[in-house]
Image (cartoon, grey):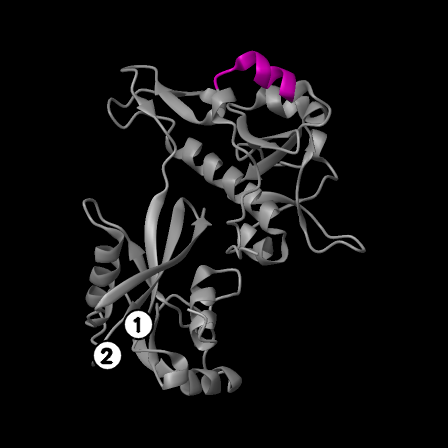
């Protein structure tokens, strides 16, 4: 069975060929089986778990019952279909009370990072998708080419400039996240962990950074490691990816091997970076001297898999 990172398990068939079919979309919005979720100021609508449930569920209400929200929304995003059910989302960030009206008593708005690990993979993916789309729309209300207002088209998957006609499509910022190591943990290899000054005391994680224009992913891994720690890497291997809509990224996970060496920290990027063997890291964790990222994150998966020799 394929193992997905949190938020990464596909939830819907996106049905891109239907995004321009206004009549079909209208029928789906009027279908009693269609579902609507909402985003409010970077928070997602969630239903709490009940007896027998596996965890919190994505907040979905019948679209026909939320017709008022649909009619008032600047844009309604068609997310896709799954098992014959159409899914839509709206952004309620302009409202002071997002749970008024059709959503009263429907659930609560929470930060997705707080509940994503406890939610089903597909449920988390659907909310991550809706959140990313809401953020993109809020950030692209004006054209970057001429400054005129843009209008939503293609069921929320395109914004067209009302001045120069330029088309703007949703964008995701690629970021590389990498666990650098000198070899297998079982063979006394060491991994390189860093921390930022803004993190909670004792928190360490894998290194990460954004991909620059004209740069391959492998080059980005090597550059970021060298810039932040002064450590050179000699091989880079892709592991997996994770949508990271906080606000608009995708994390591309890698393992990178290195001959090791003395760490020289770029203090504008990191507060500290250290080499640690499996024995040293496990001891520090037991002694509560070190904290790792939450299981929700791809950073934690990279570290855990290295510790278990499951790279």
Which part of the image, by quadrant, shows the N terminus?
A: bottom right
Q: Residues within 10 Å of mark 2 (few under 14, many from 20)?
A: some
> Does 27 appear in magenta?
yes
Whole-percent x, y for residue 192 in the image: 32, 75
Whole-percent x, y for residue 150 in the image: 37, 21
Q: Are marks 2 and 1 in contact (CB under 8 Å)?
A: no
What residue range appears in magenta? 20-28
Q: Which comes before the other along the chain, label 2 or label 1? A: 2
Residue closest to the eye, 10 or 64: 10
Say which residue label 1 marks.
271
Say which residue label 2 marks.
260
Whole-percent x, y for residue 104 in the image: 72, 36
- Residue at 68% x, 52% y: name it: 56
Which part of the image, by quadrant, shows the C terminus?
A: bottom left
Image quarter for residue 237? bottom left
Is 37 drawn above or below residue 302 in the view shown?
A: above
- In the visual, does 163 lie left or right of 240? left
The answer to whether residue 123 of the structure is visible from this angle is yes
Image quarter for residue 28? top right
């Amino acid at each position: 069975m394929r193992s997905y990172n949190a938020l990464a398990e596909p939830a819907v068939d996106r049905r891109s060929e239907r995004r321009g079919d206004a009549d079909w979309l209208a029928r789906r919005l009027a279908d009693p089986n269609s579902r609507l979720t909402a985003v409010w100021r970077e928070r997602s609508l969630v239903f709490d778990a009940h007896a027998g449930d596996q965890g919190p569920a994505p907040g979905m209400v019948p679209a026909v019952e939320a017709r008022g929200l649909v009619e008032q929304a600047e844009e309604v995003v068609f997310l896709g279909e799954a098992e014959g059910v159409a899914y839509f989302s709206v952004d309620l960030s302009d409202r002071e009370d997002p749970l008024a009206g059709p959503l009263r008593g429907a659930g609560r708005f929470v930060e997705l990072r707080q509940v994503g690990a406890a939610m089903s993979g597909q449920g988390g993916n659907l909310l991550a998708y809706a959140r990313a789309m809401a953020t993109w729309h809020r950030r692209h209300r004006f054209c970057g080419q001429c400054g005129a207002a843009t209008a939503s088209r293609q069921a929320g998957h395109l914004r067209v400039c009302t001045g120069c006609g330029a088309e703007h499509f949703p964008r995701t910022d690629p970021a590389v996240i990498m666990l650098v190591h000198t070899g297998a943990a079982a063979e006394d290899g060491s991994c390189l962990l860093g921390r930022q000054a803004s993190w909670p005391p004792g928190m360490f994680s894998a290194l990460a950074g954004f991909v620059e224009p004209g740069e391959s992913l492998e080059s980005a891994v090597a550059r970021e490691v060298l810039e932040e720690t002064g450590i050179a890497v000699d091989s880079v291997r892709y592991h997996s990816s994770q949508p990271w809509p906080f606000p608009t990224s995708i994390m591309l996970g890698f393992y990178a091997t290195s001959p090791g060496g003395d760490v020289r920290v770029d203090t504008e990027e990191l507060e500290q970076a250290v080499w640690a063997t499996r024995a040293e890291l496990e001891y520090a964790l037991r002694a509560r001297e070190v904290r790792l990222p939450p299981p929700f994150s791809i950073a934690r998966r990279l570290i855990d898999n290295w510790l278990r020799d499951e790279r």
